[in-house]
Image (cartoon, rainbow, N blue to C red):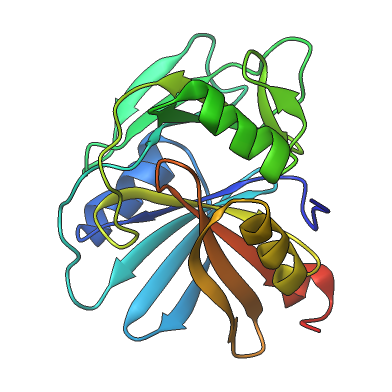
Amino acid sequence: MRLAKTALDVGLYTNQLDATLAFWQEQAQVPFAELLKVGGGLHQYRHQIGESILKVNHPREPVPVLNPSGLAQLEIFTDSVDETLELLDPDQNEVLLSPPPQGETLNLCLHLRVNDLSQAAKFYGDILALPGSLESGFYVGTSKLLLSQGKIAPVEQKAVGYRYMTIQVFDVVNTHQSIVNSGGLEGMAPVKLGDVAYISFVRDPDGNWIEISQRKSITGSLN
């Protein structure tokens, strides 16, 4: 996979906008970057974690509380702490604030619980072709995906909590098709969002949602 941005984005949905924004900006110390009006009554409050974006999605109509996704914890590496702090946002999303790891340049680590470690490792390592391993984690530039054994029930894309991750690429159509042809599950075929981005969704073996995005401000073109 040819990355257009060497970092992973993370998206969540909330019905508690004010409390959620206060948590992420004040307790988690993640600065607000911009508001993106996605359409259909959905506002996306984008926050900066190094090169990564935390997308706080707030819909006009409340989203349901359903099975949690496999996106179990978001670990943010920051010089502002000397030891790991465990936090919960208003929707009980788990957040870790940790000192930067020695020997690695990382902005965040997304801890992902999966039903089958070997099956998930094949997906992220072989089908998505991310560098790394089950032991070390899989890397999206300066961001890391770390897999752990768990029990994941069916995952809906629009519900309260951590819901998807985003990988920025140069060619969303061919990347999406390559993933599906290699055995990845299709979540949503590529679609243009005006003149802003071209996006699709694929799903890992546990049904977790992965947005494949070609954002014009990063790639320079939607062609």
Residue plotted at (30% across, 50% down): 155
Picture layout, residue 127 above or below residue 125: below
Residue plotted at (42% across, 35% down): 28
Horizontal side, residue 90 vs residue 102: left or right: left
| Between 178 and 45, the one nearer to me in the picture | 178
What is the x, y in percent for residue 149? Answer: 40, 19
Residue plotted at (82% across, 70% down): 219
Residue plotted at (30% across, 37% down): 93
| Between 48 and 138, the one nearer to me in the picture | 138
Q: Seen from this angle, which residue lies furthest bottom?
A: 194
Horizontal side, residue 92 vs residue 4: left or right: left
What is the x, y in percent for residue 214? Answer: 71, 70
Quarter where residue 199 is shown: bottom right
| Between 209 and 90, the one nearer to me in the picture | 209
What is the x, y in percent for residue 5? Answer: 77, 53
What is the x, y in percent for residue 206? Answer: 40, 41
Q: What quarter of the picture does the C terminus occupy?
A: bottom right
Picture layout, residue 153 above or below residue 157: above
Horizontal side, residue 73 vs residue 194: left or right: left
